Image: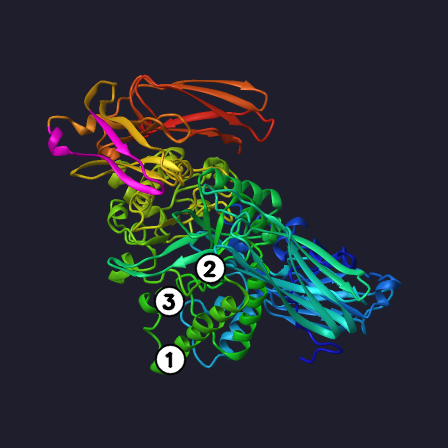
Amino acid sequence: MQIEGVLATLLLFLGHTTFAQNHQLDLDLSWELSSADTNIKVPAQIPGCVHLDLLENGIISDPFYGANEKELQWISEKSWTYSSTPFSIPAEILAATDIEMNFECLDTYAHVWLNEKLILEADNYFKPWSVPIKSILLETGNILRIEFDSPLSRGRQLQDELNYELPGEPIRAVSRKPQFHYGWDWGPKLTTSGIQGKVGIRYSSNAYIDHYWIKQTASQDGGTDLICYVEVHAPENFDGQLEVKIGEYSAIQQIVNLSGSKSISLPIKLPPSFPRWWPSGHGEQRLHDLTFRLSDNKNKTTERATIQVGIRSIELINETDSLGTSFMFQVNGQPIFMKGANYIPQDIFQTRVGQKDYEELLQDAKDCGMNMLRVWGGGIYENADFYEICDSLGILIWQDFMFACAMYPGNKEFVQNVEEEAQFQVKRLSKYACIALWCGNNENSEGWHRWGWQNDLGFIEKRKVWSAYKCVFQKTLPNTVHSFSSTPYWESSPSLGRGDPKHQFEGDAHYWGVWHDAEPFENFEVKVPRFMSEFGFQSFPSMLSINSFVQPEDQDLTHENILAHEKHSRGIALINDYMTRDFGRVPDNFEDYVVLSQFVQAEGMLKGINAHRIAQPYCMGTLYWQLNDCWPAASWSSMDNLGVWKPLQWVVKNSYDQEQILFQVDSLGISGHLVSDMPSPIGTRKGEFQLITFSGDTLFQKSIQLQTAAVHSQTCFQLSFDEIDKIDIEQCFAKIELSNSANGENLRASTYLVAPKHLGLQATELTFSQEKRGNEIEIHLAAKSYFPRVWLTSNDTGKFSDNYFPLLPGEERVVYFTANSDDQIEIKVKSLNELLAE
């Protein structure tokens, strides 16, 4: 279709409000949503999407409730139109030399009409759009109309236009739209459309900074080479200068007779003494003002802006050694063990996610000892709030490009679209100290080589599909990353699938033998890779989350409303298998089943996390699947869609501590390991290992003394069960206590020694009391016998100070709960002893 009057162009800048705030008019308009196919016509909220507007106006029921999702699939098959009310433009804007309309995010196949002239056809969620509109804009009576094609219909059309069949899920693969919108094994299929970002007008008659990006690398003298690349635009014959300054260091470039756009590079050399940014747990997160100033030949400022940047170097060490090929991150020259998780969008409807949601979730991640999150490739490139908070908290980001579990086209139009998207995103994120890696895709290479995607393709089709893969992931994306950033690029995660025997010894790994292949949790301790970028196990969410989508009388594993929120075809069956295998029973009571599913997840994942940390420096990272949810569901997450922590989150908090004693137990014996991320050694550590009966009697003890090392894992105790063959290990637990920990307190840890189903736990009751103090509840717990796991829950989404902990014989513990509401708070306590009782 011919676009009248103007040429639609990609807007490659970091958001107009970053720089020209005086030249940006955000259009705060009233909008109407309609569909000719349905005769629906309702008020609309921008930013937003079709589903939320239909929900707000009572046209549809909550997509998250019950099995409603299934009944709402018709929405994605329709075309939808957003129409604005008439708006006026001030005369000073109309008089500007350059006027353009910009769209922060259009989801996804959009035809934009201004005053009945087609000005833009958009086809990419992941990049903004800009259109010159000076010749079309009126002083009064301007009307915007944005027509969105059905994403499913357009996907089918684009697949049909290819001269070969894409394996996997081609309808989503041909679309530059969040892939999880099409459904996943943890999320709903709600393939929405809409105006998901701001709409505004940028205008100027002076020179201005259009966009920028930065590179920083370590120099040979230990300092930093910082290069700022700035795109300056001037209407005509502009003379002036561009200056960039950080601290006392600056660079200046003269501009002579500029008409149009010009890219200017300004290098700054920072000395070794310049304060560095470090990941959480390894130093301060120092951020510095980086100021851009554009002035004319009379030194009058035409544009000035300040951003914050952290100065650091990041390297991915991928070198051949005697064991295979390493995969290790170095920050400022120091190797760092990465502790974290995989992150997905926090809501299927992204416009409901606000800054507070980012702050709370990312603070939770930091509080649990995380120093890295992987932004998974089936979601979205997150907004500025996300990365700014990560910078301030010291959380590194493994950033996937938005490609996941599919093979993608390689035709000219698609590749150009991808290249423009990649250029925008790499430039946009180049200023953030937290960006540690750009990864081409999630599991595309593994899927092609090991998931049977080639089985139904002929030789020519195979060649076309793989050529497209190489074009995007071995050429376009790495070239873009290397051109516009100093961040490492990794082609595909995992580098080798679990079907390849080398996956334990080279690069990063996704290990799904546990869960998908139903292998025992003990295999986590055997199949340890150089860097674990995915592994996981499912559990149900909190009862708070479950109550939000199903009535109590329908809370049954066979009810359609429950099954609608378990997206894995074998999910419940696998949970039951592991429950029976390790815990010996599947509870009939639904709430007990939910809690035990969470215990199973936590105890199984504990084996994997501990194994990875203990194996350093062979293994230098553990990122479990997954941190969070985008709706209420059974999933692999450690916190549910309400932000409520599951037991796994508490396991992570304990195991990711900077200094911790971690156990490994198998059929032959037990070992205790002191794992430390501390930058310097604590010194000599003394302590004791004990075996204690469930009633509190000591059966075995041995002194421990070791010299600690910095950033290290060392064995502090080993015991063969043959040495204690007269002790019934089903009736006792192990405990290690070491003196002089980093915070001045003794370091303690305990563990049981056999599978939970074999534990001879006593059915004694916990002593439990609580007292409310304002919005805080003080909880007192005491035990006469051994309780391996005690679990507290509430009818409020507040936070416990501690949870999912052992209570040793004779131990008392005080826990605090801070509520989020003024409602009547109910605290419940569950224990492994209770859940295992017949």
Which secondary structure, mark 3?
helix
Q: Position of residue 404 (x, y in %)?
A: 44, 62
Q: Is residue 782 placed above or below 164 in the rendered structure? A: above
Q: Earlier in the sequence, mark 2 or mark 3?
A: 2
Left or right of residue 491: residue 577: left
Work out which quarter of the rendered image holds the N terminus and state it.
bottom right
* Residue 707 among those drawn in magenta: yes
Q: Is residue 467 placed above or below 348 in the rendered structure? A: below
State whether residue 805 appears in this view: yes
Q: Residue at x 82, y 64 (%)?
A: 298
Q: Residue at x 24, y 58 (%)?
A: 322
Left or right of residue 681: residue 158: right
Q: Over which residues does the magenta segment extend?
A: 702-725
Q: Nearer the viewer, mark 1 or mark 2?
A: 2
Q: Is residue 423 placed above or below 529 in the rendered structure? A: below
Query: 668 or 631, which lies in front?
Result: 668
Separation of residues labelled 1 and 3 (CA atoms): 14 Å
Q: Position of residue 86 (x, y in %)?
A: 82, 61
Disc 3 designates what residue?
A: 445
The image quarter containing residue 451 is bottom left
Disc 2 designates what residue?
A: 220
Mark 1 and mark 3 in contact? Answer it, CB < 8 Å: no
Q: Position of residue 657 (x, y in %)?
A: 40, 37
Residue type at the position of mark 2? Gln
Residue type at the position of mark 3? Ser
Disc 1 designates what residue?
A: 463
Q: Residue furthest right?
A: 91
Magenta stretch, overall SS: strand
